[in-house]
Amino acid sequence: MSQIYRVLIKTHHMTSRKKILTITKAAKRLSCSVVLKIRGPPGIMLAEGSGALEWMEIVRKLRYKDYQLLKKESVAEARLNVPEGSVVELSTMKELGALLARDEVLLRWWKVCMGYQNDDP
């Protein structure tokens, strides 16, 4: 069984359809589950899968403004609940929060990585 990785990236914003298409094609090719918070600031990218580290390198090369790799780690199980090779695009932080709230562990992880919550138990 291959290793599963989770990657969280924050950028200034995500508006370029050309870059989003590149990200989508990479997710499909590398069998990653991806959630994008697009349009206005901030741009958020969350990926899970065995190819997530390769996917992250493709994103890095797109040279997004204020690119920040917030977290890159190996995880025991995928929690994103997005089919492998698929990308979900959301326009607001509220929509992103609602999607992540389907899994309490993932929501807490995201809040800590974003700096919204302390890592205290």
Image: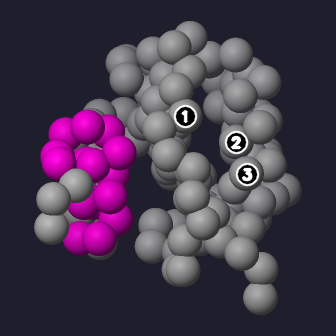
Amino acid type, mark 2: Met
The N terminus lies in which quarter of the figure? Answer: bottom right
Residue 113 quadrant: top left
Q: Position of residue 43 (x, y in %)?
A: 45, 27
21 left or right of 74? right
Distance, label 3 to label 1, CA atoms, is: 11 Å
The C terminus lies in which quarter of the figure? Answer: bottom left
Q: Are marks 1 and 2 in contact (CB under 8 Å)?
A: yes
Amino acid type, mark 3: Leu
Most extreme residue toward the bottom is: 1
Distance, label 1 to label 2, CA atoms, is: 9 Å
Mark 3 lies on residue: 53
Mark 1 lies on residue: 69
Residue at left offset 17%, top offset 46%: 117
Most extreme residue toward the right is: 29
Task: Examine the rendering and report whether any part of residue 65 can be seen.
Answer: yes
Residue 120 to residue 1: above or below? above
Q: Residues within 10 Å of mark 1 (few under 14, many from 20)?
A: some
Q: Secondary structure at mark 2?
A: helix
Residue at left offset 46%, top offset 18%: 13
Residue 72 vs residue 10, the one in the foreground: 72
48 left or right of 105? right
Name the N-terminal-most of marks 1 and 2: 2
Amino acid type, mark 1: Leu
Residue 46 to residue 105: above or below? above
Mark 2 lies on residue: 56
* The magenta segment: 104-118
Q: Position of residue 11 (x, y in %)?
A: 49, 22
Task: Examine the rendering and report whether any part of residue 85 can be seen.
Answer: no
